[in-house]
Amino acid sequence: MTKYKVAELEGALLDAAVALAEAHPLTRGRWPYSTDWQFGGPIIEREQIAIVENGYKRTEWDAYVRGRYSQDDFLDGDGFASGPTPLIAAMRAYVASKFGDEVELP
């Protein structure tokens, strides 16, 4: 097993981390959670993940699991991550909400 920083996960490694969070066996193939809305979309809806354009880096997206506004109007949540696409940001946030800043993958 190798530890990976959730903020740096992408592609097959990010999809494997989402599969692990979903309790899917990693040996049964690859689910394209981070590239296909049919796979990632239901997780976004179920986990109430808020996705917003990053106000400083217009080429990135921020995602918050169970996203909500704080008293001072900042978005917050139970898991947070950024990414180059809304789906990658959302899946990173989901994995972070389950495992923290790092996840162990085979």
Image: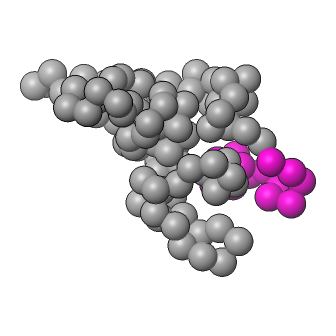
Left or right of 16, for residue 91: left
Using the image, determine if residue 28 lies above or below residue 51: below
Would you identify the image quadrant in which residue 32 lies?
top right
Location of residue 52 in the rendering, given as x and y in whole percent from the top left corner: 35, 23
Q: Outermost residue, right direction? A: 28
Would you identify the image quadrant in which residue 106 lies?
bottom right
Identify the residue at horizontal 10%, vertical 25% (top origin).
Answer: 72
Q: Which residue is more in the foreground, 40 or 67?
A: 40
Q: Main secondary structure of the magenta part?
A: loop
Identify the residue at horizontal 33%, vertical 23% (top origin).
Answer: 53
Q: Which residue is more in the foreground, 57 or 70?
A: 57
Q: Which residues are magenta?
A: 17-30
Identify the residue at horizontal 50%, vertical 45% (top origin).
Answer: 92
Q: Is residue 67 visible?
A: no
Left or right of 44, for residue 6: left
Q: Outermost residue, left direction? A: 72
Q: How is the image coloured?
A: one colour
